[in-house]
Image: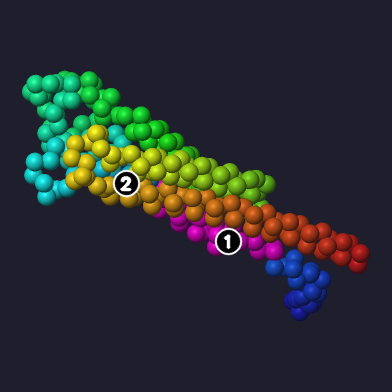
């Protein structure tokens, strides 16, 4: 009996087309999907760190009398910044403060100096990029942990992730370009010749590029999975026709 069942199972396998057998065990992710997840994790980490840290523009630490220490999107650190609205130069701002700090006397009065239009644009686009990465993280977790090729909207999920990550990377990249063009200009932060872009800005640059790469890889994965699903359906149809005809 065992031998007969083995022969019957072997005969049924011989009836299945080789291309159908190769697509029955469809992988949940191909190389592009796995690489996309890896690039996304790195991009998300870099963008999040740059979003929260105050080292987009830093002063030369070798200059002891520098007025600025470092600044980021939301926090400014000064060693001794004079109030630009105080002609008598009797008020100075020292230490790190949130740019929208409502408690420091006179800080709200220099907010127009601290946040020129290009800085607001940088905050806006980089925040869009950060939010886009947060939203994408949910989809990436579903793609990595739960979803599979047998589910109806698997390809659509990957494609949505790809487009959102691409948009997030583009927004973050636009913010980086704006800040790189105008962040160290004259007549903004004091002693601009002794300032340079810090490690937070470098992480923002790398993170935005990685997000663009991750988005491209996810879109590639969506195309691969769609093609595999089409081949699977065609192979299954041919097998059913062959099986029904016998």
Cα distance in 3D space between marks 2 and 1: 33 Å
- Residue 186 seen in the current view: yes
From where the camera sits, is residue 8 visible? Answer: no
Q: Nearer the viewer, residue 173 or 145?
A: 173
Residue placed under numbered mark 1 in the picture: 30
Instruction: Check if residue 194 falls in the magenta segment.
Output: no
Numbered disc in front, either 2 or 1:
2
> Where are the magenta residues, as a range?
23-45
* Quadrant in which the C terminus appears: bottom right
**According to the image, label 2 marks what residue?**
201
The chief SS type of the magenta part is helix
Judge by depth and name the residue closer to the eye, 128 or 19.
128
Question: Residue reaching furthest front?
Answer: 186
Q: What is the secondary structure assignment of the residue under circle 2?
A: helix
Which x, y percent locates residue 171? 46, 40
Residue that extends furthest to the bottom in the rendered view of this protein: 3
Q: Is residue 213 above or below residue 192?
A: below
Residue 32 lies, in percent from the top left, at 55, 59
- Toward the viewer: 54 or 3? 54
Q: Is residue 2 above or below residue 57?
A: below
């Amino acid at each position: 009996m065992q031998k007969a069942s083995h022969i019957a199972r072997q005969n049924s396998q011989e009836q299945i087309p080789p291309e159908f057998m190769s697509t029955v065990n469809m992988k949940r992710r191909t190389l592009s999907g796995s690489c996309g997840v890896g690039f996304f994790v790195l991009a998300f980490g870099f963008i999040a760190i740059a979003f929260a840290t105050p080292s987009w523009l830093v002063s030369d630490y070798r200059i002891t009398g520098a007025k600025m220490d470092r600044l980021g999107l939301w926090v400014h650190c000064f060693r001794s910044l004079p109030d630009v609205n105080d002609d008598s130069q009797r008020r100075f701002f020292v230490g790190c403060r949130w740019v929208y700090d409502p408690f420091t006397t006179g800080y709200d009065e220099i907010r127009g100096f601290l946040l020129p239009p290009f800085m607001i644009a940088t905050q806006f686009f980089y925040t869009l990029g950060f939010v886009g990465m947060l939203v994408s993280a949910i989809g990436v977790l579903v793609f990595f942990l739960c979803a599979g090729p047998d589910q109806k909207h698997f390809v659509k999920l990957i494609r949505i992730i790809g487009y959102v990550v691409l948009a997030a990377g583009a927004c973050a990249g636009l913010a980086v370009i704006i800040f790189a063009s105008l962040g160290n200009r004259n007549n903004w932060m004091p002693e601009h010749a002794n300032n340079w872009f810090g490690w937070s800005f470098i992480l923002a640059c790398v993170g935005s590029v990685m997000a663009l790469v991750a988005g491209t890889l996810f879109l590639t994965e969506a195309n691969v999975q769609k093609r595999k699903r089409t081949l699977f359906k065609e192979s299954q149809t041919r097998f059913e026709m062959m099986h029904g005809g016998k």
